[in-house]
Amino acid sequence: MEEQFSEECVDSGIHEECGVFGAYDFDGNDIASTVYYGLFALQHRGQESCGIAVSDTNGPKKNIQVHKGMGLVNEVFSSENLEKLKGNISVGHVRYSTAGSSTRENAQPLVLNYYKGTLALAHNGNLVNALELREELEKTGAIFQTTIDSEVIAYHVAKERISSATAEEAVLAAMRKLKGAYSLIVMSPRKLIGARDPFGFRPLCIGKRDNTYFLTSETCALDTVGAEFVRDVEPGEVVTLTPSGIVSNRELCFKDSSKQARCIFEYIYFARPDAVIDGVGVYASRIKAGRFLAMDSPVEADMVVGVPESGNPAAQGYAMESGIPYGTAFIKNSYVGRTFIKPKQSMRESSVQVKLNVLKDAVKGKRIVMIDDSIVRGTTCHRIVRMLKDAGAKEVHVRISSPPFLHPCYFGTDIPSEDQLIAYGKTLDEIRDSIEADTLAYLGMERLKELNNGLPYCDACFSGNYPIEPPTQDIRGEQG
């Protein structure tokens, strides 16, 4: 997924929390530059901060070097500071704060020096019991440097390591206390460990290039560094990468796989289209969503368009199924970065207009089917519909390749509370009127199971059926 200028990114809508990437070169070569390119491929999963920690498995055990900062991967890292990161084992992270403040202190990987040595940790997801675990540690004298739940995980791994024979046993023991979503990469002085929560909310996979093993959030990062996909880490599994191969522990895997709960929005929006998650191609899922919209919510029109970039695959699917020509209606400004200066309220220019422009000749006098992956608050969707009509579109029919957002997420997605969601408490007609569309339709809930080939999934943001009891207070403003 490239940086996206649809509802989600243009108007402070939904974002995924982060991406993780780890590497272990068993031949002893420096690995930081490879991790840099891996993080570059995961930039869509987090644009606020990033970092890389490295260690030399043949050097002193307490010598972890780390560089991290606020901004995009190519803003934080240079050839000079990458050159200083010497070591053959590494873990990297890109972050978008679903919660917890956006500060350098909260950037990952986190590095801890403790009784048994050092560890570096990168985490994707959110814990629902982070506050209780944090309070428990604080009562024993723990002092926290961040406001993120990832530090709670790191502390528990370090604490368990004191009484565990191996680092992987410490990770497993810590996991027994964690409730929520977590895909982890833990770097100890001599091992690289990957762990995925039993529900499998967030993806994690293993790759290999020559004598180097990788752990990462998405397969597209493996492609970028020239690695072959080996397999996904199973929900509940702990894997340890060693020179002799992959050591696996599946003690925490559900015996009943139907309890698993992969985030369905990975397939709809979060993951890059060229990623494959648990054997399911993301691009194919999005094409399917568009086909289903055309089957279930047809309309007479002259052209199908997607809101770049996330709406494009579903728009292609809609066009394939309906026979209505697929076209380009929007030109995006590719040079607008994450930190562009947003126009003040008093200015006529909106964030949408700065990032997106309409091809007037393409839409004038035409009936347009506009496909996007979701509507959060509705303000941006309304602006884009208005832009199409101002450019001369005769009709604008909005089709959304997900069901309506009705509930917040506590598992690593910053979907806001109900009162900020346009679909909450409104009828379909009321939503349609508020965005000034001629017609509006969402993907049906019954279609979700077909997007990821029947794998068990979490759809709590649409249905309110949480696989884990949600916290009694909204933790997302404090942890993340």
Image (cartoon, rainbow, N blue to C red):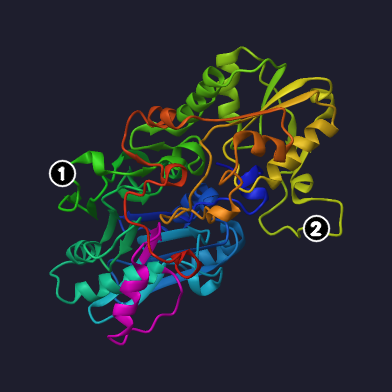
* Residue type, mark 2 in image: Pro
Where the C terminus falls, by quadrant? Answer: bottom left
Q: Quadrant of residue 382?
A: top right
Q: Residues within 10 Å of mark 1 (few under 14, many from 20)?
A: few
Of the pair 47 and 174, the residue shown nearer to us: 174
For the view shown, which residue lies furthest in the top direction? Answer: 323
Image spot of residue 368 (x, y percent): 72, 23
Residue 2's place in the image compared with 453, above or below, is: below
User: Could one spot residue 480 in this view of the protein?
Assistant: no
Image spot of residue 137 (x, y percent): 30, 79
Quick one: SS at disc 2?
Answer: loop
* Residue type, mark 1 in image: Lys
The numbered dot on residue 255 is: 1
User: Could one spot residue 187 in this view of the protein?
Assistant: yes
**Residue shown at 37% from the left, 58% from the top:** 470
Of the pair 356 and 92, the residue shown nearer to us: 356
Which residue, given by chain and number where applicable, does mark 2 sit on?
343
Of the pair 8 and 132, the residue shown nearer to us: 132
Q: Is residue 43 left or right of residue 439?
A: left
The numbered dot on residue 137 is: none
Image spot of residue 405 (x, y percent): 52, 44
Image spot of residue 231 (x, y percent): 29, 40
Quick one: SS at disc 1?
Answer: loop
Magenta-drawn segment: 121-148
Of the pair 59 and 63, the residue shown nearer to us: 63
